[in-house]
Amino acid sequence: MAAAGGFAISVPDLKTSAKFTSSSNGPSSYLANFPSHLRVLHTPSQLKTVVYERRVLLNPRCEAPSGNTILSNDVESKASSVSALQNLKTSAADRYTKERSSIVVVGLNVHTAPVNVREKLSIPEAQWPRAIDELCGLNHIEEAAVLSTCNRMEIYVVALSQHRGVKEVTEWMSKVSGVPVSEICQHRFLLYNKDATRHLFEVSAGLDSIVLGEGQILAQVKQVVNGGQGVPGFGRKISELFKRAITVGKRVRSETKISTGSVSVSSAAVQLALMKISASSYASARVLVVGAGKMGKLVIKHLVAKGCKRMVVVNRTEDKVAAICEELKDVEIVYQPLLELLTCAAEADVVFTSTATETPLFLKEHVQTLPRASSQIGQRLFIDISVPRNVGSCVSDLEAACVYNVDDLKGVIAANKEDRFRKVMEAQEIIEQELKECEAWKESLETVPTMKTLRSCFERITAPELDKCMSKIGNDGSEKVKRAVYALHVGMLKKLLHGPMQHLRCDGSGNRSLDETLENARALNRIYELETEISVLEQKIRAKMEQNQK
């Protein structure tokens, strides 16, 4: 098909097409990169001919050839055309299958997406294993992990193809959330390989949080590892990545004290309430906490630390509230079941919500029926640190209510900026150290396929010779002799492989650098032509596609 200033060649049975456009540098600028068996010469003004190695010239357009086009007989032309098309198809497949698998993060967080988008995409912790299973069912996703918190929704995958993997993950996110792909693309961020690893390390260290150095995110990263145990799609690379992220988080907090003086989301919520209520009113403010999980418990503790002596806690069950009461014996904590939610809200001036429910607990029609807050407080405060939100956005339309969510915590605390900046620099040094080690570990995995393929290559060479020897022995030889011959074969194979294998190991047993080890792998690939084998990546892609077609 001719195109203005360029052209495209479509190949039957090939999903992609080779497309080139002309440039001011002329055809030589791209000619060297085109497969050797196929050369296309053109000028910006006119498409000329396709030249094959056999010097047969064909016009790729479906029209009568021009006077200066040279054609050989039909038989030779057809044979050359088929050969060239097959070579082009092989070349495209070769480029595809030699693409290395990549670690990719597709995410939205408090910095890139508003809470009304994040809450639609959030995945409850109990559903993480199922999400991993579904993600790994996609054609180009080998491993996966989900990190979904109130501030972020991030999916980490090992993708057999970067472009295809991102496309499949984004479409899956749209499918499970109902958010259009276009809207996800508007707010998402994409990071690959080393950048993806660095991002997770910074997240675990608390550098990417609203509140610098907050500790809750490290616990959430740990939960990804704990929840991934036994899940097939939480594989070797992703598992190791998150384990190293936990190490980074621990090191940063112990070596830099970055969390000293900082606050969690829960304490930021309490501080926000203090900023909105006068000091004289705080002691008499009636407080309601909805939810007694991890976040709710922290809210209660921070309220107590700020001098609150009495509060009502609404929860589905009483056991968690009872445990908190045992821990905080000097504070009056009144438990109420969820059925009494609106009754308790009617008697509260400040309401903190932190439950995992996926539907709002407070809507406009609920709140507008409540009596006004005490005169000292004025507007009833709803501080919602849940994602999805527990308080509908429509509640903020009421004059008697003032609603804040996690996005409103961004400007709560800005103290000790200089000290925190210094700690961030120290944390980054730790991250770079751990990142270097992690990248070295990932690079070392490149030698594993070479080791396996080399062993298979040697076995394939020696097996026919063993068979010949056994056939010559025939029935005249005893079983003892045959076993001895087979043992000799195995022993020689091991000794022949010992040297190459030693030079491919990255377990710290030798003095070789990583670069030297990788060069050894490349040399063996060239010497034994191991790259002519079907690549590991291609095998994985084929297996996944066959599985999905069943």
Image: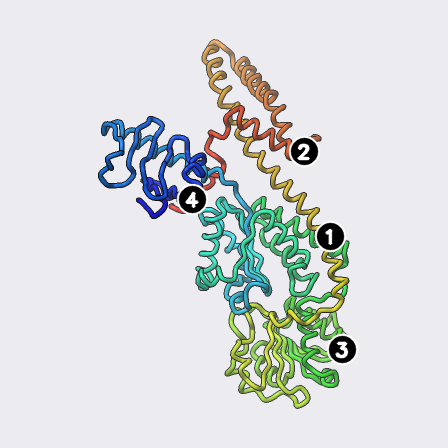
Say which label, 1 or 4, has the lower sequence index: 4
The residue sitting at the bottom extreme is: 375
Tag in front: 1 or 4: 4
The residue sitting at the top extreme is: 476
Badges 2 and 4: C-beta atoms under 8 Å apart? no
Query: In the drawing, what numbered circle is on residue 307?
Result: 3
Tag in front: 4 or 3: 4
- Using the rendered view, name the quadrant where residue 346 is placed: bottom right
Query: In the drawing, what numbered circle is on residue 23?
Result: 4
Instruction: Indicate left or right for 302 with 459 as reference.
Output: right
Q: Residue at coordinates 70% horizontally, 46% vertically from top-left?
A: 433
Badges 3 and 2: C-beta atoms under 8 Å apart? no
Rounded to the nearest angstrom, the CA distance separating label 4 from label 3 is 72 Å
Say which label, 3 or 2, has the lower sequence index: 3
Badges 1 and 4: C-beta atoms under 8 Å apart? no
Residue type, numbered disc 4: Ser
Label 1: few (<14), some or many (≥20) within 10 Å?
A: some
Residue 156, image x, y percentages: 55, 52
Q: Which residue is mark 2?
A: 513
Label 2: few (<14), some or many (≥20) within 10 Å?
A: few
